Amino acid sequence: MNDALSIDPDVRAVLERKGPVVALETTVISHGLPHPENLETARGLESIVRGLGAMPATIGVLGGRIRVGLRDTELEHFATGTGIRKLSSADLPYAVATVADGATTVAATIVCAQMAGIEVVATGGIGGVHRGAETTYDISADLTQLAKTPVTVVCSGAKAILDLPKTLEMLETLGVTIITYRSDDFPAFWSRSSGLPSPLRTESVDELARIVRTKRSLGLRSGIIVANPATETDEIPLAAITAHIEAATNEAQTRGISGKALTPFLLDRIAASTSGRSLATNIALLRANARLAALLALALSEKR
């Protein structure tokens, strides 16, 4: 697979000096946000990371090459191009072998980040156990990939469209460390609290860096989730978003939408029914998580 990996020279230079790098996914660009907000957000996330002194490395597959670090024209391609596959970790070999273009999910992004030697990934919300999974068995590969990939993912918890209690239980079973930043409650993407207690809490980036380093020193190979709750200004309280989630979920069931198409469909429907409020919150979460990820990458770099 190393033959298929292409690291941008600027990203490689920072990695070689063990400097701070933050990996960013491309599925949110190609399949998660509408145009032009997707391109504006992708550029904005990179700008936030750079502004804090870290190097952004947006990851995607172009022409069968796993690209770690994209040029602006390539970000635009992911934002506006057609036929761009949504790639989980299981899809990477197919995309490489068939010389395809593909946007990486969290699962695929953390695989590529580990290949490149990047420790920190920023995203919006991770995937998890879907509602009704006891009959559909629809569970995101994000969870199983985190169980065997030693990277740290900064997110706003798991997407609120999921079965959050089951998602947390599965992450615990898989040995993934879950730490919420400055809150006792595990966030639910748009909402500061899911109503579920967070397994662990931390108050500072320096403490987070110590935890990451300690986990690696113990030889544990699973990943770490840093859950970063939305601000009170940006959040949509769970009570306010629940009806929108249930209506979108019911529509997806009626129309038989499942698999990779389910999450984009639900997010699109919820954005429409909230008159764009959920979209604005989603973008705010992405930006806040990029900031925290950059600060964590800097702290890890200093501790080397």
Image (spheres, rainbow, N blue to C red):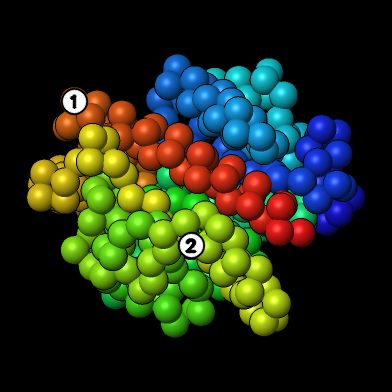
Residue ID at (74%, 40%): 68
100 w.r.t. 73: above or below: below
Q: Which residue is mark 1?
A: 275
Q: Position of residue 213 (x, y in %)?
A: 65, 68
Q: Position of residue 182 (x, y in %)?
A: 35, 57
- What's the amino acid at mark 1? Ser
Q: Identify the mark nearer the N-term, 1 or 2.
A: 2
Instruction: Give the camera-side residue of 9 and 208.
Output: 208
Q: Viewed as shown, does residue 104 lie left or right of 182?
A: right
Q: Viewed as shown, does residue 250 lie left or right of 162?
A: left
Residue ID at (86%, 47%): 17
Residue ID at (78%, 38%): 11
Q: Which residue is mark 2?
A: 225
Residue 23, label in figure:
none
Q: CA distance from mark 1 to mark 2?
A: 30 Å
Residue 66 visible at all: no
Q: Quadrant of the N terminus?
A: bottom right
- What's the amino acid at mark 2? Ile
Q: Quadrant of the C terminus?
A: bottom right
Instruction: Give the camera-side residue of 269 and 294.
Output: 294
Instruction: Give the camera-side residue of 108 and 254.
Output: 108
Q: Position of residue 154 (x, y in %)?
A: 50, 52
Is label 2 in a helix, a strand or a loop? strand
Instruction: Give the camera-side residue of 251 and 240.
Output: 240
Judged by depth in the image, the label closer to the viewer, 1 or 2, is 2
Q: Position of residue 283 (x, y in %)?
A: 39, 32
Residue ID at (59%, 43%): 294
